[in-house]
Amino acid sequence: MTPAGMNRRRLLWLAPALCAGRALAQSQNLLQESDDEAKATGYRADASQVDRAKFPKYAPGQTCANCSLFAPDGDKPSGGCALFYGKDVLAKGWCNSWEKRA
């Protein structure tokens, strides 16, 4: 049985829109440099763009991917961070709370 008005043809017609909605929802979970919490920690989506004069703690090679606060999500280019609940950060990113992974 199918819900009223739903058939395979209609489902195939709606599939691209459903996928686009999922991609949009995932991108909304990505921390942006313009977010208040990102500004407070000096988050940069690309560690190579960190202002070393402003953040002397930064050293080349430090990225979210090798931070102890980062939780990778398989082979995705982003993952969770203990600092930013509900938001993903890019593995190639960096913030002033970076701590070496043990």
Image (cartoon, helix red, strand yellow):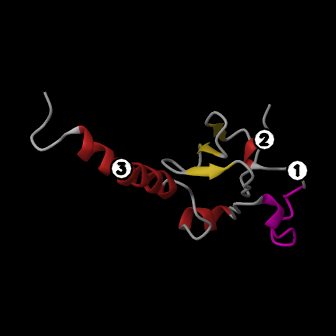
Numbered badge on residue 61: 1
Q: Which residues are magenta?
A: 47-59
Foreground of the two, 14 or 68: 14
The residue type indicated by label 3 comes to Leu
Q: Is residue 42 above or below residue 81?
A: below
Q: Is residue 83 left or right of residue 68?
A: left
Q: Residue furthest left?
A: 4
Q: Residue 81 location, x and y as percent?
A: 61, 45
Q: Residue 80 location, x and y as percent?
A: 58, 43
Rendered image quadrant of residue 17: bottom left
Q: Residues within 10 Å of mark 1 (few under 14, many from 20)?
A: few
Q: Secondary structure at mark 3?
A: helix
Q: Is residue 77 above or below residue 101?
A: below
The residue type indicated by label 2 comes to Asn
Q: Residue furthest top?
A: 1
Determine which residue is flagged by label 2: 66
Residue drawn at the location 80% of the way across and 40% of the way down: 100
Q: Nearer the viewer, mark 3 or mark 2?
A: 3
Rendered image quadrant of residue 47: bottom right
